[in-house]
Amino acid sequence: MGTLSLRLPESIHRHIREIARMEGVSINQLISSAVSEKISALMTEDYLKERRERADIDDMEAILNRVADRKPSAGDEL
């Protein structure tokens, strides 16, 4: 496991400390989780952009054209 020294403004440190206390975790756990979530979001965005580049609009339209034309089920119309 790596070690990272991080300088934060006191106001952010105060918020982190309070959130960690409310969540019942250490500051280290909170920051590790937050960074992991951010990495996951960025990787997902990259993955979706890559998939978009490979998408074939004609194939997508062909698939959508196979869907039956019918009214939505009750509750799905909104």
Image (cartoon, grey):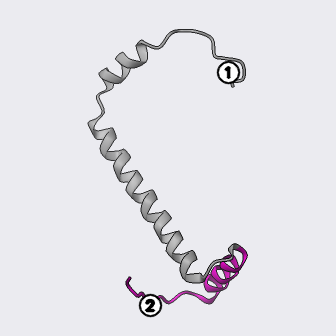
Say which element carries label 2.
loop
Mark 2, residue position: 5
Mark 1, residue position: 77
Say which element carries label 1.
loop
**Magenta extent:** 1-22
Q: Residue at x 41, y 59 (%)?
A: 42
Residue 69: percent from left, percent from top: 53, 9
Q: From mark 1 to mark 2, how far is it between C-alphas?
A: 52 Å
Q: Residues within 10 Å of mark 2 (few under 14, many from 20)?
A: few
In screen coordinates, is 54 left or right of 7?
A: left
Is 35 rendered above or below residue 4? above
* Corner quadrant of residue 27: bottom right
Q: Residues within 10 Å of mark 1 (few under 14, many from 20)?
A: few
Residue 59: percent from left, percent from top: 31, 22
- Amino acid beneath label 1: Glu
Q: Residue at x 61, y 85 (%)?
A: 13
- Amino acid beneath label 2: Ser
Pick the quarter of the image with the N terminus.
bottom left
* Corner quadrant of residue 25: bottom right
Q: Is residue 16 covered in magenta?
A: yes
Q: Is residue 41 covered in magenta?
A: no
Question: What label does residue 49 carry, if any?
Answer: none
Residue 68: percent from left, percent from top: 50, 10
Q: Residue at x 37, y 45 (%)?
A: 48
Pick the quarter of the image with the C terminus.
top right
